[in-house]
Image (cartoon, rainbow, N blue to C red):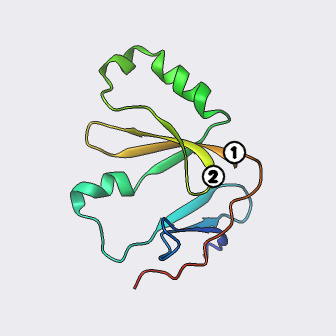
Amino acid sequence: MCLVLEEIWRGSRDDKQLNWVNMKVPDGDTYIEFMLYDQLPAPTARGSAHHMCLYVPDAAATKARLEARPAHEKYERPMEIRVGTNRKRQMNLFDADGTRSEVMEPTTVDGVPAKSSTAPPPR
């Protein structure tokens, strides 16, 4: 069996080196984001680099729901909504071991798709 993926976006932190390649499954909107490195992160940093992301329709509403839960009192990290390189609102959450989960809106802030990077991949 062969899994055929379609490249849908490339991202770069600085337009000098490619950092992400997003590949979509053939029969849906699900995609995998491959993280590219010139040097593999230290094992203690991989929980942040390697993560899972869930689409949410509204990042601010998701943040408000999470802050209203009793478990939020024990959560010590800031819950900040930011606009990523892909121009989508997103928020990072971390478990006690530092493993990151991301929530992200499916569309860009203005509805215009983010331009793919033309930066070269790491060597």
- Rendered residue at 27%/36% (across/down): 96
**Amino acid type of the residue that numbered disc 2 sits on in the rendered structure:** Arg
**Position of residue 115 measured from the top left corner of the image (x, y, whole percent):** 69, 66
Mark 1 → mark 2, Cα distance in angstroms: 6 Å
Three-letter amino acid code at disc 1? Val
Q: Residue furthest bottom?
A: 123
What residue do we see at 25% from left, 42% from top? Answer: 97
Q: Residue at x 66, y 64 (%)?
A: 24
Under circle 1, the secondary element is loop
Q: How many marks?
A: 2
Return the disc, 1 or 2, that comes first in the chain's sequence: 2
Q: Nearer the viewer, residue 3 or 120?
A: 120
Q: Is residue 70 left or right of residue 30?
A: left
Which image quarter is the C terminus in? bottom left
Label 1 sits on residue = 109
Q: Quadrant of the N terminus?
A: bottom right
Q: Is residue 122 above or below residue 97?
A: below
In the rendered image, residue 91, in percent from the top left (x then y), is placed at: 50, 39
Instruction: Identify which residue is drawn at 45% across, 16% down.
Output: 69
Judging depth in this view, the residue of 4 and 59 nearest the camera is 59
Instruction: Give the residue pinned by disc 2.
Output: 87
Q: Secondary structure at mark 2?
A: loop
Q: Are marks 1 and 2 in contact (CB under 8 Å)?
A: yes
